[in-house]
């Protein structure tokens, strides 16, 4: 049972259900970032939203394309999927399908770290080490002028207080619950849903992005026209992702890092044929 779910009206006038208000404000600001560096969507397109969370990208794309877009959205965490379901049901669109599992290099059941206070960090590959906590704090402090609005106000308070507040927020964000989630290969989904083309494959899966791509069989790569991923550059992963995309025919690849993430492992990768 989900119980009471709070609602918020986004700046674009869309009303949604949500889990954490600050998280919604941050993720909403990110939405336009997926559609740049040549990435385009038009009415009638087919979109795979892998790592849909509560559905902000799905809702953004639906509105952008006047509700004439076929969206397949995937979210493995049951508590988050329930909110995604509520948000999609409100649209009353037959063109949006949602699935209570994640996408990976193989199908099966896995243990997952769910962060209720920062759902976007939920992951198959958790890292709540002190190094990671300190890294997040230092990157935030070093890039406060570029930070999202919900945290930018820290510029106006003494530095020692900033560090204390960030420590509290980060420790709260890293409070994890161990849950069981289901995964499927992307090619398995393509067969099940009789997908002939994917105009945009959007992937935001917290350190599982290479797994998603490795679940695409050779005969399915040509169906994918555009890809945008958040990539964690661990063990040279950005280069590995770039090489894999080039191997499968993506000739225009752009790699960017948002200003407020300078010094961290997060990068955005955009790929077009």
Image (cartoon, rainbow, N blue to C red):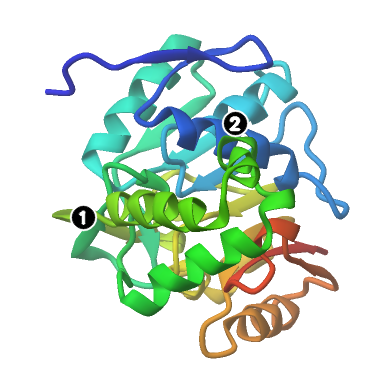
Q: Secondary structure at mark 1?
A: loop
- Based on the displayed image, in which of its 4 quarters is residue 180 positioned? bottom left
Residue 42: where, in percent of width, then height? 80, 32
Residue 241, relative to residue 96: is it above or below?
below
191 and 242: which is toward the camera: 242
Gap in angstroms between the C-alphas marked 1 and 2: 33 Å
Residue located at (44% from left, 10% from top): 90
Residue 150 shown left or right of residue 34 in the figure? left
Residue located at (66% from left, 64% from top): 142
53 and 215: which is toward the camera: 53
Q: Which residue is mark 2?
A: 70
Q: Secondary structure at mark 2?
A: strand
- Based on the displayed image, in which of its 4 quarters is residue 143 positioned? bottom right
Residue located at (37% from left, 55% from top): 170
Residue 210, relative to residue 224: is it above or below?
below
Q: Visible in this render: residue 108?
A: yes
Q: Quadrant of the N terminus?
A: top left
Task: Specify few, some or many for label 2: CA neighbours under 10 Å numbering under 14, 14-19, or 20 or more.
Answer: many
Residue 88: where, in percent of width, then height? 44, 20
Q: Visible in this render: residue 92?
A: no
In primary-sequence order, the first of circles 1 and 2 is 2
Q: Which residue is mark 1?
A: 176
């Amino acid at each position: 049972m989900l119980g009471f779910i709070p609602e918020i009206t986004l700046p674009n006038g869309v009303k949604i259900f949500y889990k954490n208000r600050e998280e919604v404000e941050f993720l909403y600001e990110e939405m336009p970032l997926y559609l740049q560096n040549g990435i385009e969507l038009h009415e009638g397109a087919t979109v795979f939203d892998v790592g849909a969370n509560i559905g902000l990208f799905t809702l953004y794309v639906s509105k952008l394309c006047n509700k004439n877009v076929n969206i397949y959205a995937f979210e493995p965490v049951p508590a988050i999927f329930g909110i995604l379901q509520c948000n999609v049901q409100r649209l009353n669109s037959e063109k949006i399908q949602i699935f209570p599992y994640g996408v990976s290099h193989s199908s099966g059941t896995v243990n997952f770290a769910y962060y209720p206070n920062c759902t976007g960090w939920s992951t198959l590959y958790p890292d709540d080490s002190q190094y990671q906590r300190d890294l997040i704090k230092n990157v935030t402090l070093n890039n406060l002028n570029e930070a999202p609005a919900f945290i930018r106000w820290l510029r106006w308070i003494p530095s020692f207080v900033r560090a204390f507040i960030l420590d509290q927020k980060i420790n709260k964000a890293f409070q994890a619950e161990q849950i069981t989630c289901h995964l499927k290969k992307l090619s398995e989904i393509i067969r099940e849903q009789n997908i002939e083309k994917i105009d945009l494959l959007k992937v935001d899966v917290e350190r599982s992005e290479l797994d998603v791509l490795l679940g695409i069989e050779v005969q399915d790569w040509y169906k994918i026209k555009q890809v945008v991923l958040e990539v964690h550059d661990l063990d040279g992963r950005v280069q590995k992702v770039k090489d894999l995309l080039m191997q499968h025919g993506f000739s225009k690849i752009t790699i960017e890092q948002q200003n407020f993430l300078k010094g961290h492992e997060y990068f955005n990768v955009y790929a077009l044929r």
